[in-house]
Amino acid sequence: MQRVCEETDAVKREVENRKGDLRAADVGLIISVWKKLQEVQKEISDLETRKNAISAKVRALVDEHDKSTLASLEEYTSAREEGRAIREKLGQLYVQEGELEKEHYCRALRLPNRSHPSVPIGDESQARVVELVGEKREFDFKPKGHLEIGESLDIIRQRRLAHVSGHRSYYLRGAGAGLQFALQNYTMDFLQKRVTIFASVVYSLDPSRFPDLNLAGTGEVGVAGYFMDHAVNFKDLPVRTVCSSTCYRAETDTGREAWGLYRVHHFNKVEMFGVTSNETGEESSQLLDEFVMLQKEIFSSLKLHYRVLDMPTQELGPPAFRKYDIEAWMPGRGSFGEISSASNCTDYQSRRLNILYEGNDGNLKYAHTVNATACAVPRTVIAILETHQTKEGTILVPEVLRHYLGSEVIEKPKYTPIKYIGPNQPNGQPYCLL
């Protein structure tokens, strides 16, 4: 809040540049409520000090005088009355403090992080292409989309699932499921020598016991929680962790990518999360660059054509100081699609989660955090299927995945796929036994 008060105009510009319901006018209100809260807390502190002094005075009078004479002692009775008035006033002030804290933090916690000076200002159209990697594959046939490919190979099923799990759900079958596990295992093995710690993520599924907990949208949430209320020793920084987790998204904008694996309610991904120091102000930027380099190595090894984007202000989440997106070329879609991102959150998350590091001098300081997706499985599957498809309808498996999948080619099934006999038949007549 000290920075918000001292650099109010800069904070207002930051709020206006970001996407969200918080506007510049809210910054003034946040400061106003904060100052009222400070005044109330100062008054509480002064009254608590005075109350303690009066309590000490009353105890001294009790020790010095006979109990039978205390009631007639003006100094004693006036001290008791003042103490009673202070306690009544404190009760009112503590209620006021609670109301002001609630009003303040409801808005203040939504203030975004600062943006890196090089971050473009505006919406996604202002994203700056940092690097274009690989060559766009040329086809001598019209490339198919991943869902058409997946259904043809019987490795993806997304139709007729309303009775199972609703819209935007899917099955990966056979080589489709194998490709998912291959990507996860390959990515974890790739990062094993480059990352300090492997971590798992815990989910709660019982709303009757934990009504205020939700399924996480990213593995970053669980790993950040691991470091919450803990301090890392300076000599162990930066700490690099990786986890493989299932993620859950509402994807309420049903008009976009209604079919296929691009926008789904649940998916698996491998996530990197780092904790670093803030001695020079450059440590977290260096760790961000390191994570992006690892992402690039993974996607290059999968023989994908992709680009790295420096994302503009409206595409940054509130915690992000800077964010890079990686978009792969998806021939079936005829466009680039996001497959990964990496964000430097500086001390935004650590201040809220109380993640600290202990310096060589023994003092505790707020750490910086960095997160990056190493592999979001469904979207990487899209890029692989659409990039490595053949005219014959098969898929050439990237060399680095062949060991995990046990095959060089995903071929058309030699069996007869199961037949739908449910109620939604083209002729309106479901199959039934006589």
Image (cartoon, rainbow, N blue to C red):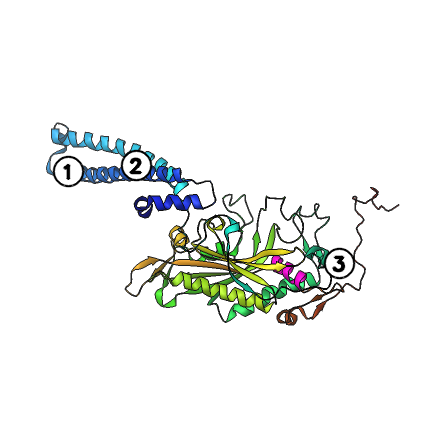
Q: Distance between the residues labelled 1 and 3?
A: 88 Å
Which callout, 2 or 3, points to the residue nearer the camera? Answer: 3
Q: How far apart are marks 2 and 3 (CA)?
A: 65 Å
Q: Is residue 168 left or right of residue 203?
A: right
Q: Is mark 2 on a helix, strand or loop?
A: helix
Location of the C terminus by quadrant is top right
Q: How crowded is mark 2: few (under 14 residues within 10 Å), some or many (20 or more)?
A: some
Q: Distance between the residues labelled 2 and 1?
A: 31 Å
- Residue 379 in sight here: yes
- Residue 69 in sight here: no
- The residue located at (66%, 50%) in the rendering is 169
Q: Check disc 3 and report the residue beneath it.
A: 152
Q: Is residue 162 above or below residue 245?
A: above
Query: Could you say which quadrant of the image residue 12 lies in?
Result: top left
Q: Position of residue 293 (x, y in %)?
A: 49, 66
Q: Which residues make up the magenta segment?
A: 378-387
Q: How crowded is mark 3: few (under 14 residues within 10 Å), some or many (20 or more)?
A: some
Q: Identity of the amino acid at label 3?
A: Ser
- Any magenta on residue 298? no
Q: Check disc 1 and report the residue beneath it.
A: 57
Q: Which mark is residue 36?
A: 2
Which one is earlier in the sequence, the residue at label 1 or at label 3? 1
Q: Identity of the amino acid at label 2?
A: Lys
Q: Identity of the amino acid at label 1?
A: Lys
Q: Is residue 354 above or below residue 426?
A: below
Which callout, 1 or 3, points to the residue nearer the camera? Answer: 3
Q: How crowded is mark 1: few (under 14 residues within 10 Å), some or many (20 or more)?
A: some
